[in-house]
């Protein structure tokens, strides 16, 4: 099993947010988590990614048998976890190429692998940028500076492709995307992550991303725990009827 979450409780600023969440994800699976605002979806992603300020008070989370919650954020990344943010941050003064090469080689070093040469890295970057229809010139610019919302999300998916994680946790990747960008990002997720040795946890409000990245399982998160699970048809039901009855 790639990710196993058991009875997870977490607080932010002493306020309980996650209240007994359990979830299991196997390699080769794509899971979607949907739910109303304030349900705890982003909190779940931050807890799994190791963001400071999110305190686990009970329960466990393991990643390929390792205690995920006992690992530093950089160790989680080196082990193969990738967190895509709802609002990717700008990093003035740091070029995309520099940032990504340093990130990739730091992870390779942590895994005991040799660093990629400049030429090999640029070949990899061109390949992944092509998948997301992102001009290579944008990778020479400071990270996300001056990018539109759609460009930031495509840039983040290029980052995911270059780093090659085992598990991608994507927090509202569809936020701020128009129809064309949504299709490109969805196609990129499929090309990079739909493999038997990888898995994806998609966090979203809406069904529209799932038109392009069809999940194996859909879960409804409400009041800090998963209250219902099903197949792709559950997302269509939520789109028609909303969360009120399920989350009650």
Image (spheres, helix red, strand yellow):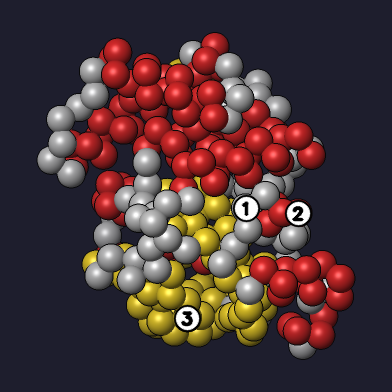
Is the residue under label 3 in contact with that under label 1 (CB below 8 Å)? no
In the rendered view, does 108 fall on the left or right side of 242?
A: left
Sequence-wise, the earlier of marks 2 and 3 is 3
- In this rendering, the answer to whether 28 lies above or below 159 is below
Q: Quadrant of the N terminus?
A: bottom left
- In this rendering, the answer to whether 42 lies above or below 133 is below
Q: Secondary structure at mark 1?
A: loop
Question: How far apart in space, not on screen, are marks 1 and 3 (Cα)?
Answer: 23 Å
Sequence-wise, the earlier of marks 1 and 3 is 3
Percent x, y of residue 214? 63, 58
- In this rendering, the answer to whether 171 lies above or below 158 is below
Percent x, y of residue 67? 26, 69
Q: Which residue matches tag 2?
A: 208
Q: Residue at x 30, y 13 (%)?
A: 119
For the residues carrying marks 1 and 3, which lies nearer the camera in this image? Answer: 1
| Residue situated in front as seen by the camera: 228 or 30 | 30
Q: Secondary structure at mark 2?
A: helix
| Residue situated in front as seen by the camera: 4 or 180 | 180
Q: Which residue matches tag 3?
A: 22
Q: Residue at x 15, y 30 (%)?
A: 114
Q: Residue at x 81, y 85 (%)?
A: 245
Question: Which residue is at the far front?
Answer: 196
Q: Quadrant of the C terminus?
A: bottom right
In the rendered view, does 38 fall on the left or right side of 139?
A: right
């Amino acid at each position: 099993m790639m990710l196993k979450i058991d009875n997870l409780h977490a607080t932010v600023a002493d306020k309980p947010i996650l209240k007994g969440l359990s979830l299991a994800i196997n390699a080769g699976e794509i899971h979607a988590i949907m739910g109303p605002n304030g349900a705890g979806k982003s909190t779940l992603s931050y807890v799994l990614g190791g963001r400071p300020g999110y305190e686990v008070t009970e329960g466990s989370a393991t990643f390929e048998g390792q205690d995920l919650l006992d690992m530093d954020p950089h160790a989680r990344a080196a082990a193969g976890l990738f967190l895509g943010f709802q609002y990717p941050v700008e990093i003035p003064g740091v070029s995309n190429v520099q940032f990504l090469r340093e990130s990739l080689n730091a992870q390779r070093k942590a895994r005991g692998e040799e660093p990629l040469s400049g030429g090999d890295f640029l070949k990899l970057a061109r390949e992944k940028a092509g998948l997301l229809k992102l001009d290579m010139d944008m990778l020479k610019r400071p990270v996300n500076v001056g990018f539109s919302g759609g460009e930031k999300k495509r840039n983040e998916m290029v980052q995911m492709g270059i780093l090659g994680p085992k598990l991608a946790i994507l927090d509202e990747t569809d936020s701020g995307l128009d129809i064309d960008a949504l299709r490109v990002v969805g196609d990129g997720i499929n090309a990079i992550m739909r493999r038997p040795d990888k898995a994806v946890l998609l966090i979203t409000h809406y069904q529209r991303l799932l038109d392009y990245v069809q999940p194996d399982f859909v879960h409804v998160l409400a009041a800090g725990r998963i209250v219902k699970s099903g197949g792709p048809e559950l997302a269509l039901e939520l789109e028609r009827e909303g969360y009120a009855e399920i989350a009650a």
